[in-house]
Image: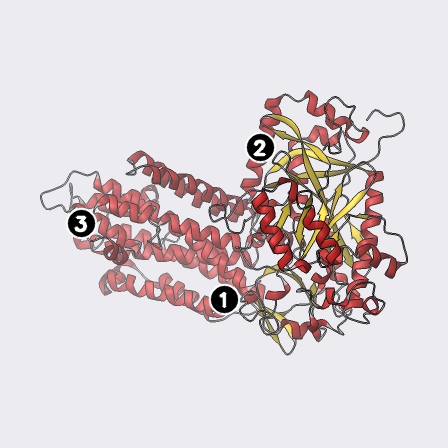
Amino acid sequence: MLARTADNLFWLARYMERADFIARTIEATLRLEYLPRGGDGDPQTEWFSALEAVGAHESFATKHGELTEPLAIDYLTFDRDNPSSICNCLEYARANGRAVRTALTAETWTAINDAWLELKRFEATRRAAKELSRDALTSFLDYVKKASLDFDGACYRTMLRNDGYYFNRIGLFLERADNTARLLDVKYHLLLPANEQIGGSLDFFQWVAILRAVSAATAYHWVYRDRVKPWLVADLLILKPSMPRSLIYCYDALDRALDDLARADGHSGAAQRQARAVLSKLERASMTEIFQSGLHEFVTEFIEENSRLASAISEQYLFV
Amino acid sequence: MAAFDEMGLEGEAPRRVYAKVARWLEQSPPELLASRRAQAEFMFRRIGITFGVYGDKEAAERLIPFDIVPRLLSRREWTKLEAGLVQRVTALNLFLKDVYGARKILKEKIVPEELILRNPHYRPEMIGHRAPHDVWVHIGGIDIVRIDDEDFYVLEDNARTPSGVSYMLENREVTMRLMPDLFAAHRVAPVDDYPDELLATLTSVAPHPDVAKPTIVVLTPGPFNSAYYEHSFLADKLGVELVEGRDLFVDNDHVFMRTTLGPKRVDVIYRRVDDDFLDPLVFNPESVLGVPGLIGAYLAGNVTIANAVGAGVADDKAIYSYVPDLIKFYLDEEPKLKNIQTYRCRDAGDLAYVLERLDQLVVKEVNGSGGYGMLVGPHATQAQRELFAAKLKADPANYIAQPTLALSTCPSSFDSGISPRHVDLRPFVLSGAKGVRIVPGGLTRVALTKGSLVVNSSQGGGTKDTWVVDDPLEGEEG
């Protein structure tokens, strides 16, 4: 496969996954916003951490002096100046897809192109209205999640299991691992065992919001059959192999996709070694140890290891 | 001026080949046709068949309008046309071999020397080079028009990178899905073997016959090119990589593509990039679309480029006027297709004639394409004609003129009903090491604006599916 094609497939999957994560983060933040506030509540904190979780807080601060909810939402959804806004993610995803149409099945391309045509309609509505209504925002976010599902489903159901599919999976899970880890990084202080307060804490809603951002609110109850406890939230997102957004699940999938690729190619390299190393570390880890040596440090190191894997893949396959 | 209508105009009995279409149009309620038009547009937009239009930012990805009423040719008409196309393209290949080789045609003064040597598409770098298997125009798009039910006229020879074949194929898919009954009522020659024929053609011209399965690629300028959809479509149907210049490199006069497994040798390049942009070392040094060293590899005989570098000499509109002479010279045959009377403005007598009749003639740049740089005299304003007169006087050799033809019309479907529109036809002629092949039919382009003669998609033209149908049996109703 052409190195450029692999590169495009990889980024196509990353952008579709990122759009989904941003949409879920906005939804979770909106739910927190609806809560009644205590005297010390700062309405901007939630939007700041939402921006932080998607890595847009610095560029936001450069563009806007003050932080308000409408500005934050607009920046995350329709703002073309934000390289990671949802509309830019979908635009880049389609540009990558269009550049490799021959490597996509008709179903996959249609999923991407339909999403993009729909985006154009939403953008037109957005331009026509002075402010995005809650209704319009809700339907926009629903649409983004669906677009991502359609894309992923089309890939899963129709793509040949060859290098094109493997690069698609690698992009998807690398991005997803990064998203989950960033969310943990922003919210880690809420997840420490010391933070458990019995009854009535607003933190409860924070924990649920984290779960919602990675579509795990229902899964939590199925896994633990317990009320929401912060350290179990951390356990779910880091070490539960059955949870499709946990770090360990993402690395299991990355390891497998890279192995499949190596088998097809007949040689394996630094990318395979790096994925294997991170996976074994996660397999050996326990939450007790992670809390003892510091959740924050653990997550920070994971984010670095994850981007090291991204560079290894680039070097090994994409010639950049 | 009443044009020949291929179905037969209202009040006339329909031509036999069109009998079933005429009845279908008559019996289909307008709502049904409207819903078919809407469905067609939806299908095209969804699969992303778009066409970029240069110089129109808003319309960076515009849909080419599709007219749902098919255009029909009888098998008998097609057989006649096909023979003429094979003859014509065979002569063009011999002409190019001669121009870059022995130059007999110049020595015998059949074609004036300066017409070749001054031609911007003439590539002196190719002098003495023999294209692999002596094939130069691997994919030819010969534009055909009719003015009566007797003859086919050639309007233009496109010997560089003719486009539109993806529309021929997609139009058929859409028609079969939208109008299964009408389709089933005819015996329509299939076109979907075009990609197979193209693959066989490209495989046959590989530089090393010992390579059993040559590596073929489609070279595109990239997603911003107006025909990008077609490039990706063709690569997909051929099952070969769609590459950009930056995906290729040349090492020791061999061409390689960068893959995830390292460099892979390339044998045949179906390029959709103009000569000028192929190799910055030889042609346009500013080009970022090309591959440095590509021409070196080509001249060393290590890669085949289709269409061959320099083939543009044959699609010059001044050369066009000599094609009947080329056919006689190389094949010793009478031309089977007619040429349109062409005035060469480089000739003082012709120039004077043209300047006097600008309001009656179509004037074209000898190297123009896509309907740009032309004047349709009868439809132009006085100011436009004066502007063209000045251009003509300044550089007469750059222009030819032809009578404004009453191009044939075919029925088209609009919100306002069925109405005739002018059409042309671009069959795609494939030349390989084993001869010339043509998939029956081609792309019918239609000028959707009432009365307009300009069918180019960049100028608001649309397309139709083209059916070559078996002739009705004796006694069989239409």
The residue at 64%/32% (across/down) is: B178
Q: Where residue B406 sits in the image (x, y, percent)?
A: 72, 38
Give the spatial CA distance, label 2 vs label 1: 41 Å
- Mark 3 burial class by Cα count in 10 Å: few <14, some 14-19, many 20+: some
Q: Where residue B363 sits in the image (x, y, percent)?
A: 67, 49
| Image-based side of A43 in relation to B396, left or right | left
Give the spatial CA distance, label 3 vs label 1: 46 Å
Q: Which residue is mark 1?
A: A318
| Image-based side of B349 in relation to A241, left or right | right
**Residue A136 in view:** yes
Give the spatial CA distance, label 2 vs label 3: 59 Å
Same chain for mark 2 and mark 3? The answer is no
Q: Tags 2 and 1 in contact by the CB under 8 Å rule?
A: no
The residue at 43%/66% (across/down) is: A276
Looking at marks 3 and 1 on the same chain, the residue that comes earlier in the sequence is marked by 3
Closest to the observer: A83 or B280? B280
Residue type, numbered disc 2 = Gln
Label 1 lies in what chain?
A
Same chain for mark 3 and mark 1? The answer is yes
User: Which of the 4 image quarters holds residue B47?
Assistant: top right
Residue type, numbered disc 1 = Leu
Closest to the observer: B180 or A245? B180
The residue at 55%/70% (across/down) is: A267
